[in-house]
């Protein structure tokens, strides 16, 4: 799953089992009419609540289910912030070590307020609606957990912002 920026679209969404190309995503997001590029990266940290010594996270996701949801998030952001330039929403799958980038949001806009708001909306919506599983390995063991709390599959008429949040999702 190699991530390559689109040539003709201003939205770049996807999953990859390779390192997320942070520098390439920022460079891709820059546009002549945009004075702001906001970058958010989520990285693997060495601890979690009640789990010291985290050494690895393993992410799993179904590309056929996740990518349409990421595209829906981008479309929803564009409806909210009409002047957005480019928008990247990228997530990693596979085994990641402490310090590696697991998720990236890059948003460009003519002004910083819109870029910040759109980037925050994208990561917050991803975390609450996209089904991505993670297995945490720490000093005391390992366990699977859902990174987010999604509900029904997104179809063409769904708007991500209207999705009800569910807290009790069990990994199959």
Image (cartoon, grey):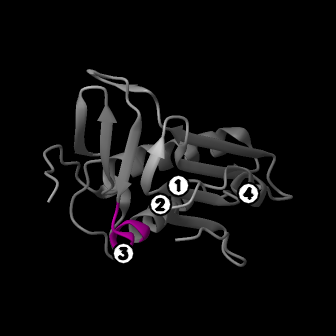
Q: Looking at the image, is mark 1 or mark 3 earlier in the sequence?
A: 3
Secondary structure under the numbered disc 3 in the rendered image:
helix
Q: Nearer the viewer, mark 1 or mark 3?
A: 3
Q: Nearer the viewer, mark 4 or mark 2?
A: 4
Q: CA distance from mark 1 to mark 3?
A: 25 Å
Q: Nearer the viewer, mark 4 or mark 1?
A: 4
Identify the residue position indicated by label 3 in the image.
64
Q: Counting other residues with Cα less than 10 Å from the Cα at mark 2, is it few (<14), some (14-19), or many (20 or more)?
A: some
Q: CA distance from mark 4 to mark 3?
A: 24 Å
Q: Nearer the viewer, mark 1 or mark 2?
A: 2
- Secondary structure mostly seen in magenta is helix
Percent position of residue 50, x then y? 26, 21
Identify the residue position indicated by label 4 in the image.
24
Q: Are marks 4 and 2 in contact (CB under 8 Å)?
A: no
Secondary structure under the numbered disc 2 in the rendered image:
helix
**The magenta segment:** 61-67
Quadrant of res 119: top right
Identify the residue position indicated by label 1 in the image.
80
Q: Looking at the image, is mark 2 or mark 3 earlier in the sequence?
A: 3
Q: Are marks 1 and 2 in contact (CB under 8 Å)?
A: yes
Examine the structure image and report whether residue 66 is included in the region drawn in magenta: yes
Q: Nearer the viewer, residue 25 or 162?
A: 25
């Amino acid at each position: 799953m190699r991530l390559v920026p689109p040539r003709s679209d201003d939205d770049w969404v996807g999953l990859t089992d390779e390192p997320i190309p942070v520098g390439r995503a920022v460079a891709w997001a820059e546009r002549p009419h945009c004075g702001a590029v906001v970058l958010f990266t989520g990285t693997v940290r060495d601890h979690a609540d009640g789990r010291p010594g985290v050494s690895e996270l393993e992410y799993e996701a179904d590309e056929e289910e996740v990518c349409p949801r990421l595209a829906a998030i981008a479309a929803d952001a564009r409806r909210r912030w009409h002047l957005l330039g480019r928008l990247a929403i990228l997530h990693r799958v596979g085994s990641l070590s402490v310090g590696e980038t697991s998720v990236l949001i890059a948003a460009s806009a003519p002004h910083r307020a819109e870029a910040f708001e759109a980037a925050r909306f994208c990561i917050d919506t991803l975390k609450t609606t996209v089904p991505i599983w993670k297995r945490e390995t720490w000093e005391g063991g390992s366990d699977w957990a859902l990174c987010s709390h999604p509900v029904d599959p997104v179809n063409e008429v769904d708007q991500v912002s209207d999705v009800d949040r569910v807290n009790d999702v069990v990994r199959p």
